[in-house]
Amino acid sequence: MKARLSLFIFLVGSCFASLAQPAFIKDSLDAFITKGMQDWQIPGLAIAIVKDGKTVIMKGFGVSNLETKTPVDENTLFMIASNSKLFTATALAQLEYNKKLSLDDKIIQYFPDFKLYDSTTTALVNIKDMLSHHLGTKTFQGDFTFWNSSLTRREVIYKMRLLKPGQQFRQSYGYCNSCFVTAGEIIPAVSGMPWEVYVYDSLLVPLGMSNTHTLGQGMDQMPNAASPYTNGFSNDLKLIPYDNVDNIGPAGSMVSSVKDISKWLLMQLDSGRYNGKRILPWNVIDRTRQMQTIISSRKSDLYPSHIVGYNLGLLQRDYNGKQVYWHTGGADGFVTNTCFVPEEKLGITILTNNDNQQFFEILRYQVLDAYLGVTGTNRNQKALAGFKEEHAALVKKTDSLKARVRGSQPPLSLSAYAGTFTNELMGDIEISVSNKGLLIQFPHHNGLVARLQYMDHEEWLLTYNNAAFGIFPVRFKTAGDKVISTEIKCNDFIEYDAYLFTKQ
């Protein structure tokens, strides 16, 4: 009799849980995702939604690889990139709770030789500043140097002294990956364990996140790993190499699945508990949710929101009267997000393997709309037209550049352009003559090379061997028969500004 009664209670409870879900989630979510993936050329997508302590959606769509056609499921691995940042901030907040450090500690307390461009900032900057993008540098500044490079974490930290800030310290927001590398390197200084080991032992193991990797190296050998794709400069999806960003691990090297991230979300929504077990003290969780940097305090044109800010490894905004915490992550070939709304006991994670799309965020907001009572908006329709127009213009521009490569001869001999070129931040690159054109080698960038083909009017077409880095026009500054310098750019997805390289 007890068994029958328990079964009845379970069935009734399951029925009410189903009825409690918004109509969009019950009736339209799958179709919305399928349509969105077609619109945005997304090979694979995985989503998990947790609500009121339970997982209500956890599934995959599409394929992890276009050749093998392996279906995406809840265990498919994606690079979660900057969603790693909350793990780093949480680890440091845990160390603070355990009296190993204070987030107000100065960086020079741990690294006496640490320097920033400005000596006053060097003396004042603390761990909390590093975790809240408060340095005054531009968003992504230095990332062309740091991303996919062979630099060690300590070498990345050393080079921060060369990042000239364009904004005010503690007054401006500029998203800074090297800041998180610096903060993360304090973990071994106080715990004796590398960042990747400490995060694994103190956060992943207690949560049973056994399918999550703190480092991404060897992802191509990980079972059920999604392959990375991009179509940033063309209409066709291209398979690209996996990033190796373990050198900036605290900022974004982690690999995970929606099944594992759902455990992280459930813990966040239960004040540090998971399955009734205390994983983290509430004070640790709460520390990461305190706003440090105001990004905007104006009403949004897109969302029912007025205030956006950055906490510690975590963004927050008001959304139709509720407090929403989230972060996105972008690696070459992957864009992802995690999101939770404590007042609604709602958590969302979405992982995808095409980096040139907005649908991973559109879907998150559409799910938020459904649960938080925002009606009458199809966010995919609103965003798609503008994206297609912008993308078509970029593809047209890129195709027009390619069409200008017609075998014309540059003003100087090819050998005049060859040699060692240097940039203070990145260091040396080598330009050599190759196949009636020029070849640029980036010695510190894990096999990255670029081809230079002469177009006309003293312009060259630069094409990277990794499609994620982009295609751009390049000019050389000359004086008579001498080459003086050149400016080289990569995809804005990595860094916005071009680098000036001077010939040695």
Image: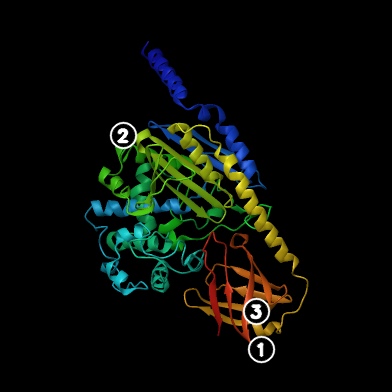
Residue 376 drawn above or below residue 288: above
In the structure shown, which secondary structural element does the residue marked by tag 1 occupy? loop
Q: Which residue is painted at 38% across and 47% down in the image? A: 307
Q: Residue 245, image x and y in percent?
A: 48, 61
Looking at the picture, tell me which residue is in the foreground, 95 or 347.
Answer: 347
Q: Is residue 137 left or right of residue 217?
A: left
Q: Residue 353, image x and y in percent?
A: 57, 49
Say which residue label 3 marks: 432
Say which residue label 2 marks: 276
Q: Quadrant of residue 33?
A: top right
For the residues bearing labels 2 and 1, Cβ distance under 8 angstroms: no
Looking at the picture, tell me which residue is in the foreground, 296 or 12.
Answer: 296
Quadrant including the N terminus: top left
Mark 3 or 1: in front is 1
- Mark 3 crowd level (few <14, some 14–19, many ≥20, 10 Å Cα): some
Residue 479 drawn above or below residue 5: below
Q: Quadrant of residue 292?
A: bottom left
Q: Gap in Å between the C-alphas at discs 3 and 2? A: 62 Å
In the structure shown, which secondary structural element does the residue marked by tag 3 occupy? strand
Q: Which residue is painted at 65% across and 79% down in the image? A: 432
Identity, as a three-letter code, of the amino acid under mark 1: Asp
For the residues bearing labels 3 and 2, Cβ distance under 8 angstroms: no
Question: Which of the colour schemes (rainbow, by chain, secondary structure, one colour) is used?
Answer: rainbow
Say which residue label 1 marks: 481
The count of marks equals 3
Identity, as a three-letter code, of the amino acid under mark 2: Gly
The answer to whether residue 223 of the structure is visible from this angle is yes
